[in-house]
Image (spheres, helix red, strand yellow):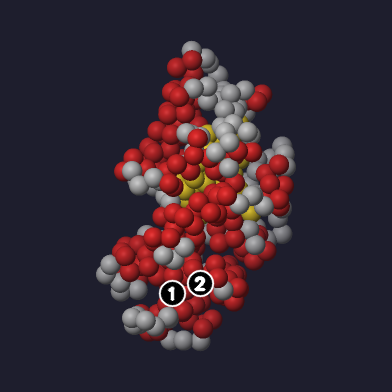
Amino acid sequence: MSRPLRIEYPGAWHHVMNRGRRGEPVFTGRPDYAAFTSLLKEASELWNLRVAAYCLMPTHYHLLVQTPEANISRCMRHIDGVYTQRFNRLHQFDGPLFRGRYKSILLDADSYLLQLVRYIHRNPLRAELVDRLEAYKWSSHRGYLSRAKGWSWLHKAYVLSMLSARPRGRLEAYRNFMRLEDQATLLGVFNQKKWPSILGSEGFIGQIKERFFPGKTHDEVSQSRDLAPEPERIKQVVCAFYQVDENRLMVSKRGVFNEPRNMAIYLMRRLRGAGLNEIGKEFDMHKYSSVSSVIERMNVQISRDPDVRKRVDKLRNLLGKSQEKT
């Protein structure tokens, strides 16, 4: 049996899960949960793994992560491998702990990021381990509700910005969102024995398949490809799409919504996983907060305006086609 498709590129979002072999527990008490959580923090520091959500259940775990450095395989080898060593040493066991390699789904964050955060955090409720999410200690749900410095490693700001444009309203928006039931279609996906390799809109899935795996099924693809377009390519495609000169991308006026500029900045962040510093240099922006504000405004526009979402989807496809030609 061939391995499932592994796609890695800068800025990619992944939903990752693994279970104990033969359904056996992989967490038996506080020391185990604490050891795994410590490894997540370690990976965030060593390899810039952005952990947006996690939930540790007795027999398995769920992670929602972003990889600015296209290194999900490296991170997970470390996390699963080192945790197995620590678990075996603590419990005087030997041999494999997990049933095999982790499962991973490449995620279209625009369509599914918020849903995945809720799905992951609500695991203890669905399993009837607790009757209130706040009562479960071993997920990042508490981190979303806390301002303590101990949670500074959790990559929650981006998720919260998708829920509310106003910083003061984000915590309440998160609480309200978590009270909603998970979508039946999403539950159906994760109840399957075999997970899909990609979860997203038709445009997102088509972009991945058509650009990088033409004529091939998932099972025929054994290695990852770098899907990130270069900054100049993003600028060229955005300018052609909006029929504007590239100078338009460098213009910023207070109170004026410059969609071509904002779209290019957004795509730099989403498709390249570019850092605020890199984006700032490309668009002559001297403050990280200015870059972050543009991205947050675009997230709000995308969540509220279906026409903006369609333009994002079209630009993703155009960038995919242009990438094939280079």
Q: Nearer the viewer, mark 1 or mark 2?
A: 2
Which residue appears at 43% of the width and 34% of the height? 37
SS for dot 1: helix
Q: Are marks 1 and 2 in contact (CB under 8 Å)?
A: yes
Q: Quadrant of residue 253?
A: bottom left
- The answer for how far apart the CA atoms under marks 1 and 2 are is 11 Å
Which residue appears at 72% of the width and 47% of the height? 188
Question: Residue 189: in sight, yes or no?
Answer: no
Instruction: Rate crowding at label 2 as few (under 14), some (14 to 19) or many (20 or more) other CA atoms within 10 Å.
Output: some
Q: Is residue 236 left or right of residue 255?
A: right
- The residue wearing badge 2 is 301
Q: Residue 296: which numbered mark, if any?
A: none
Query: Looking at numbered disc 2 in the image, what kind of residue is underneath it?
Result: Gln
Residue 47 lies, in percent from the top left, at: 39, 44
Residue 296 lies, in percent from the top left, at: 43, 66
Which residue appears at 33% of the width and 81% of the height? 254
Q: Is residue 268 above or below residue 177?
A: below
Q: Residue 193 versus residue 182: which sits nearer the camera? A: 182
Q: Is residue 11 above or below residue 128?
A: below
Question: Residue 146: in sight, yes or no?
Answer: yes
Residue 186 lies, in percent from the top left, at: 67, 50
**Furthest residue to the left?**
286
Q: Residue 117 versus residue 309: which sits nearer the camera? A: 117
- The residue wearing badge 1 is 262
Q: Earlier in the sequence, mark 1 or mark 2?
A: 1
**Furthest residue to the top?**
92
Which residue appears at 55% of the width and 58% of the height? 109
SS for dot 2: helix
Query: Looking at numbered disc 1 in the image, what kind of residue is underneath it?
Result: Asn
